[in-house]
Amino acid sequence: MSNWKTAGVLTLAVLVVGSPVAASDRAAFTPGKVSRDCADCPEMIVVPPGKFLLGSPETEAGRGKDEGPQQAISIDRPFAVSRYEITRRQYEGFVRNTHRPVVGGCITDRRHIGDWQPDERSNFRDPGFAQRPDHPVTCISWQDAKDYVAWLNTRTRGGYRLLSEAEWEYAARAGGSGAYPWGDDPNQACRYMNGTDQTARRKYVKLSYVENFGTCDDRVLNTAAVGSFQPNAFGLYDMIGNVGEWVEDCSSKDYSERHGNAQPVTGVCDRRVVRGGSWGTVLRQLRSAERVNQTATDRDDSIGIRVALHLKE
């Protein structure tokens, strides 16, 4: 929970999603269908092309300086995004299949409430709180996320990757231009996401920033099962809250060098971008434009994975 604790879209289709379709070929990945490449692969939804404003206006409450200047971004081709965050069950399959060692040192407050520190006992199997197999995996570094994607590509016809930061915000906004994917009313938060609320307030009442917690109550303290809240207009669940999501990009001070494209900011860097906020994030930092950068080697009890899929023409 580390860092988080202390524009308009043009002509976009709204997707109607149905039951998953096993994709014998990528032709099954079409708008309106939930598809997946294999039984234990993530369910994917096609996001249509379009245009949007990356970042936030200067008048938006809670805005950070790194959220501007706003940039008009074009998404020229459809791409697929995992319907849910990657679950404990899915990540466990990767670990067992590759005989990957389970590493501790996850940042958690299991020793002292409200004091998030690396803890050698804490890992994705035991992040310091109870989880079920259908909860999002957490305590995952950026490299862990990349390795999961690489493994997924060995089990399929390939094309899986992390989202770029611009793609992530486009998918999260899903045609909206408000502060949140559901609009500008923070009091609607508990219908759509799992963040700091009245349940969290009762545990963390002594924190100095507890007054920034939401006024609604989703009745979930830590992670929730994926898909527990309402999806956005693209049919994607938990884009905001539950766990933050690593994206491909290196951290950047702002969007002044973005130049209108959705490509990730790449290079050799020790800090990567995490988007979406988590169960432990205060409401003003659960906005669609909120940016957090984290050391790429960090494993945190509030950061996990969402994947994208390149769709060939």
Image (cartoon, helix red, strand yellow):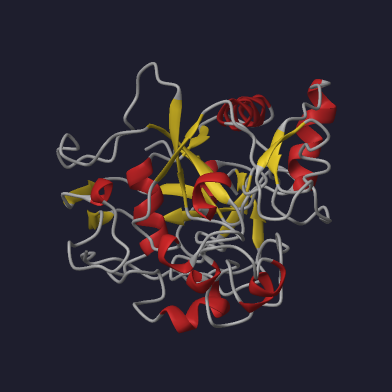
Residues 162 and 282: in front is: 282
Q: Is residue 75 visible?
A: no
Q: Is residue 12 left or right of residue 301?
A: left
- Going 54% across and 54% down the picture, which residue do you hit? 5
Q: Residue at the far top: name it.
A: 268
Quarter assignment of residue 205: bottom right
Q: Is residue 66 above or below residue 192?
A: above
Residues 236 and 121: in front is: 121
Q: Is residue 81 above or below residue 185?
A: above
- Going 80% across and 54% down the picture, which residue do you hit? 129
Q: Is residue 5 left or right of residue 258?
A: right
Quarter assignment of residue 202: bottom right
Q: Is residue 39 left or right of residue 143?
A: right
Question: Residue 274: x percent and y percent?
Answer: 47, 43
- Going 83% across and 21% down the picture, which residue do you hit? 99
Q: Is residue 56 above or below residue 103?
A: below
Is the C terminus in the top left, top right, bottom left or bottom right quadrant? top left
Question: Residue 116: x percent and y percent?
Answer: 65, 45
Quarter assignment of residue 262: top left
Q: Is residue 137 visible?
A: yes
